[in-house]
Amino acid sequence: MAVGEGALGELLPVPGVRLATVSAGIKKPGRRDLVLMALAPGSHTVGVFTRNAFCAAPVVVAREYLTATGQCPLYLLVNTGNANAGTGAAGLADARRCAQAVAELAGVAAEAVLPFSTGVIGEPLPVQKIVEALPNALAELRADGWLDAAHGIMTTDTRPKACSLRFTCGGQSYVLTGMAKGAGMLRPNMATMLAYIATDAAVAPELLQTLLSEAAELSFNRITVDGDTSTNDACMLVATGVAGNSMLDSTQAPLYTALRDALQKVCVTLAQGLVRDGEGASKFVTVQVNGGREEQECLDVAFTIAHSPLVKTALFASDPNWGRLLAAIGRAGLESLDVTRVGVYLNEVLIAEQGCRAASYTEAQGAAAMAAEDITIRIELQRGPATATVWTTDFSYDYVRINAEYRT
Amino acid sequence: MAVGEGALGELLPVPGVRLATVSAGIKKPGRRDLVLMALAPGSHTVGVFTRNAFCAAPVVVAREYLTATGQCPLYLLVNTGNANAGTGAAGLADARRCAQAVAELAGVAAEAVLPFSTGVIGEPLPVQKIVEALPNALAELRADGWLDAAHGIMTTDTRPKACSLRFTCGGQSYVLTGMAKGAGMLRPNMATMLAYIATDAAVAPELLQTLLSEAAELSFNRITVDGDTSTNDACMLVATGVAGNSMLDSTQAPLYTALRDALQKVCVTLAQGLVRDGEGASKFVTVQVNGGREEQECLDVAFTIAHSPLVKTALFASDPNWGRLLAAIGRAGLESLDVTRVGVYLNEVLIAEQGCRAASYTEAQGAAAMAAEDITIRIELQRGPATATVWTTDFSYDYVRINAEYRT
């Protein structure tokens, strides 16, 4: 089950990036569960990672190789079927062994290979199976491998998420292509989420990190399915530089703006794609909060609504139970909130104002708004200029079923 | 569905308290949906209320009458079937009209009557129906009315929650009896919860408030079903003084300790009863966190676990998915948490230590622990002396069904 159209547009190869998707038999025989990405020498790569204190072994290793060694990554290795999380010192050694195995086959330093894992927590990583599949992966690398790879990184996802943009600046054309996987344990501060985005522009590493952090904040950190944060989240951005532009290293350059806008579009598209394919999702819900004193309090209200099981079950039932929205707003912790100024809209229907049901509101209007698959809940706080938007789903029987049966 | 035995012990009348439970036909004809409690003159009454900014009209009025007027309450009026919340100025007027109607019939000041409501949010309170049922309620008041009243205040509760204790101090015997209702929208800072507790001891109001606040903090504020906070919560404690003891007004008096212990026992029993009858509950889960630097961080970890939909669906499935416990601990926001020191126990089975699965642990042990209806999750942080315990339930299909169908 997923909400809305899942058709992907054309996925453009990114000069300097090749991908392979092969089967290592990690959890199920025959499943294509191993993705290898090869990056052209000279590529710069940055990442944002889970803030969970129990971060998985591959996250520890990828972050270490990325930040501590000064070595530019040349390979990204992603397995599904096993998260290599909660695996202690043995898990760290396993992640390093996978990187080492790629490095030996490819003739590069181990620190040039970043490992990523997603899947069940707490099982030992079947390193041998992965190592045995690597020669095949290296042989299969190709520029048009994005769609296969987007399939390859899926776990409980029902469909791949990926998108491409072409943008121009100063007469030169650039490509930006990204893919991501969800689909539960999703909440701000990165979700159970792996995302890989690449451009052929040449971008200095510090600026690349700024671009990614900003874009992630406005996209992946604005979505929630169930409020849980994964141990394995990682979002990587690669700039291969194959386009041949002079290295982008200033926020004043026109290319900065063009790349920033394109990156935010790709990240928001991928993030919304994760929500639309959230576990058990039957609705795609935009929660927009306007009129806050500052952005943070808008986010507090938006996430309190987006995390409320009572709101989410009402959404599942297509029940315009606005009382639950008021209750969620009221417990979001805003200082001296004047509830008589708060307005609540379902799509464009005003359902509550002055702390109670709007005089103009009818249940028929609410029911009509709720019947849609895509719903916007808009809150007007009327106490300041700030605004924030987050995206979420409903809570369905299927959410319970998927997560109750996950390991069985 | 509810977890464990629901049999109530004997409910002891509290000298100075009489109760009536009658039908006003608020939501369903014939349902006994109106409870009136009459308190002997000289009774002191205190309360703790929802911290939701959208608090319901009766909460506003009850708090005002209780704190602003200096008038000791003589009647508590509780209706189910309608929360009189999200009802604006009309709702406030409705709550006052109900209090006024009791006052006129009983010949007391309106401010001596505190109104309480629970049920659906956002519908106008059917004041006329309530007023018409009041003469009958006044006529039916009786000392042994606790059990009927515990039934009368129920909404989606499947069974009444009430308990009694007799305690002695200085050769004198006292009674403490309480009742409460849940059952969803339950979380710390008071739940969708109404609770009424009374003793025949004479206690000075300031001390009575201290006793109630402390007991509520360790009981009702330590439970969660779904993380939502109701607009209508109220927990009232009455000390009638009919026992004839000299007014308790010092924390140094032996009676203080005796009453405090009895009150905490009653509150914990009622709070656990609410969780056991939580919406869709199939498990009763104790989350105990030890070894924190301070109590608050133990509570942060405990509530992050108790609110995690992934943990709760795993509990529903009786799946010892300890990875989800580690993930929840890791995102609880503890500063510089050393995950290699964290131990996780399911009942008495050590399942994880040093950040990964315990060497001694087997899935069979975990499955055996999970098979029970009552489960204790114990976390050892090993970084300080503090400890905290909260109680919660699992997340089941029934939770979704109950909350999706609530208004239909």
Image (spheres, coloured by chain):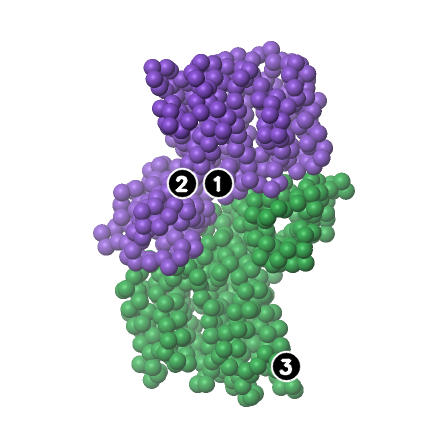
Chain colours: A green, B purple
Q: Decide which of B28, A220 is in the foreground and name it.
A: A220
Q: Relative to A220, is B81 above or below? A: above
Residue type pointed to by label 2: Val
* Tally of numbered tags: 3
As drawn, the residue found furthest toward the top would be B139
> Mark 1 and mark 2, same subunit?
yes
Q: Relative to A173, is A228 above or below? A: above
User: Which quadrant of the view contains residue A35?
Assistant: bottom left
Q: Position of residue B91 (x, y in %)?
A: 69, 32
- Identify the residue under disc 1: B188
Residue pictured at 56% horizontal, 13% vertical: B141
Residue pictured at 54% horizontal, 34% vertical: B49
Q: Decide which of A43, A372 is in the foreground and name it.
A: A43
Residue pictured at 68% horizontal, 21% vertical: B100
A103 with respect to B106 (left or right): left
Cα–Cα span, label 3 and label 2: 55 Å
> Mark 3 and mark 1, same subunit?
no
Residue B103 marker: none
Q: Secondary structure at mark 2?
A: strand
Local packing at callout 1 (Cα closer than 10 Å; few below 14, some 14-19, many 20+) is: many
- Identify the residue under disc 3: A254
What is the chain identity of the residue bearing mark 1?
A: B
- Identify the residue under disc 2: B390
Q: Secondary structure at mark 1?
A: loop
Residue type pointed to by label 3: Pro
Residue type pointed to by label 1: Pro
